[in-house]
Image (cartoon, rainbow, N blue to C red):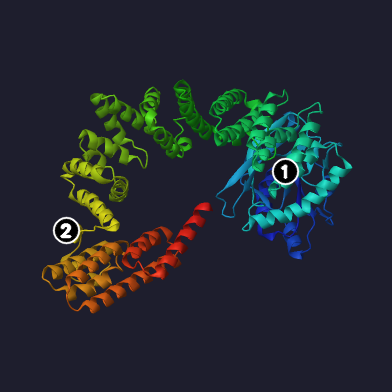
Amino acid sequence: MKIQLSISMLVSDRMETLGKCLASLKPLLQELDSELIVVFTGKNEETLELVRQYTSVIVPFTWCDDFSKARNAGLRKAKGEWFLYIDDDEWFEDAGEIIRFFKSGEYKQYGSALYVQRNYLDLEGNRFSDGDVGRMCRLTKETEFVFPIHENLAPFPEPCKRLGAYVHHFGYARKEELNQKDTRTSRNLPLLLEMYEKDPNSPQCCMQIAQEYRSVFEFDQAVEYCRKGLALARREERIYNYELWLQANLPLLISYTGDLRLALKEGESILKHPRTLEVGELYLSVTLISVCRRIGEHRKGLKYVRLYHEKLSYLLKHQEKARVQSAAGMTFEQVKKEEVPVYVDGLFFAAETRDFQMARQILSWIPWEDEEQVRSLYPRLEEWKKSYEGQRDAILREYGGLETDNAYVRIQKVLFAESQKDLAKLEELWGVCVCDCPMGFQWELIEIAVRNHFSLEPLIRRMSPEAWNEYARMVAERKEGAEVEEFYQNIMPLLAGRPFYARKLEQCFLEKLLRQGLPDSSELKEVLEQYCTSVCTDAEALYRDEALADPEAYALPSRYRFAAAIKEALEFIREGKFIESVPILKDVVHFCPEMSRAVGQLLGYLEEEMAKPQQAVSEEFAILGGQVKQVLRGLIDGGQWEEAYVVAGQLMSLLPEDLEVLRMKQEILKARSSDQNN
């Protein structure tokens, strides 16, 4: 019986992945007439013991910085009709498709096959990129590996079968990614430059040198070799995968140097060249759209959005071309993932040029029914609408003409009906949206209901208390001045049957006022009283009397503990017992640090009111400030920068002369800035 498949594996001493690799090959060895050849470059006997459990064909090889020589050592031992090679840091998720390819006899119709290498970009496996790799082919006398680095099988005969099977590869995932890249480049680059010196007419070598320079951010050198490689590749009769890579990456590498105008010019030149492949045109379009966005070339940006759509549509109809046009890390499937971001960029370009006919067309191209793909773009679509507020009606009109059941689009249709004062259509569409609202957009439906006096009951029934609380916080932060008062008056009647919801909204508005500060002491006491009464009313409805009788003894929410204490302090103040209220106010800041400004203002009022003992109150005031500083330091040590920023601002008003507070505020600002830049 003939051997169908020879599997050759390059093995060092990577025990952490070797076991996974061998286990993933076991089904191939069991189900097919196949053999495993191991080229051993390691030193550990433990590694050999594991390998011997799977094969007796072990080829010792002394490493010489030449991958092709190592691969060819295994290739020379191969007896199969076909040959497959793999590394010991890769393993198949499921080899079933490869098994079926051989068992069915389909392999006899092909000269080679591709499968997918999934390259992980972090050690947790959350980020990765997929790329087709040519690791399988019919074995002939001419078959050999070429190139010491990034070695290839040659010749790689046609026709080629694309398989969906994939290997996991964590070789590029590193905790200290930058240092590891430097290590790989310091090994690879001298070898590649030596190869280029011996063979300066190799476009593939130029591509590999460009890749290495790119990995260490030396973009000028990467551009230089990319240009050389592309010029050499164009002399060849056939278009190979390295030419596709060079076509797509030259403008991108130029953009990394900062010369965006040159990147645009170079990209446009490559697009005009007759050898540019369709997948290359897709990648070039993505790059040029990004460049146009950054330099404000909106009309040209629209041109490349149209080109992307045209080439994408063509390749979706000609899947055979899409399959074979691939290069290192570049496939049709990968660039297709840019579809929705490209179209959203196009919407911004259309708004800038006031080309609403084009906006309508682009909106029709977005795959609205693919909820998973478009959901992540909703924030950018919202940004598009808000960035061109003067064109809002025109934008909503374009949504109104779309034929789709997408929930986000339906909300835009509701807004359009509202702008047209079509109340019957508005109420009908609003009712449908309530039953199918995208996550995070309930707030839009609430706003529409409040403006048009619709019952909120159908919507609230579908909202969790947590979702309502989030909405209440958001609306309190967004609305200012007279807008708050008008909204409050309009929404409260709609919440008549939902007292908890009404009080939560009320509490968020009052919290905002207290955090901002109320200069008038009587208004401060009134707002504090209203806030504490609202919070305590909620607590009395939710908790037993014995729990409320001793808040310290129970795990009650800090908001209630704050409110209960402030109510007690306010009662002492009403009775003129100022001294008794001070210790309460001194302790209460620990419950809600964000309320420290309001507490400080109340203490300031007490200091003014108390004729005696003036000094005692000042000391208590200073003690309170010291306690708030401790709270602030705890937030800083815990990296809670947003909360710390709020407390620092309040503490500045409480202790305006305290330089330590000033230093802490600067520390917070630097840390926030660093986090945002990262």
**Percent position of residue 224, x then y:** 76, 40
What amino acid type should be assigned to the residue bearing mark 1?
Asp
- Left/right placement of residue 248 relative to residue 298 reads right
The part of the image, by quadrant, that contains residue 445 is top left
Residue placed most toward the observer, 670 or 83: 670
Q: Which residue is mark 1?
A: 220
Q: Is residue 17 above or below residue 346?
A: below
> Disc 2, disc 1: CB below 8 Å?
no
- Left/right placement of residue 107 relative to residue 662 reads right
- Count of numbered marks: 2
What amino acid type should be assigned to the residue bearing mark 2?
Glu
**Crowding near the residue tagged with mark 2, few <14, some 14–19, many ≥20 C-alpha atoms within 10 Å:** few
- Left/right placement of residue 471 relative to residue 244 reads left
Residue placed most toward the observer, 578 or 175: 578
Q: Is residue 678 above or below residue 292?
A: below
The residue under the point 64% across, 34% down is 261
Q: Is residue 81 visible?
A: no
Q: CA distance from mark 2 to mark 1?
A: 66 Å
**Percent position of residue 551, x then y:** 22, 69
Q: Which residue is mark 2?
A: 526
The residue under the point 14% across, 71% down is 572
Q: Where, quadrant-wise, is the N terminus in this rendering?
A: top right
Q: Is residue 471 visible?
A: yes
**Percent position of residue 598, x then y:** 26, 62
Of label 2 and label 1, which has the lower sequence position? 1
Residue placed most toward the observer, 661 or 488: 661
- Left/right placement of residue 302 relative to residue 107 reads left
The residue under the point 36% across, 62% down is 647
Residue placed most toward the observer, 408 or 141: 408
**Percent position of residue 98, x then y:** 67, 39
The part of the image, by quadrant, that contains residue 585 is bottom left
Badge 1 element = helix
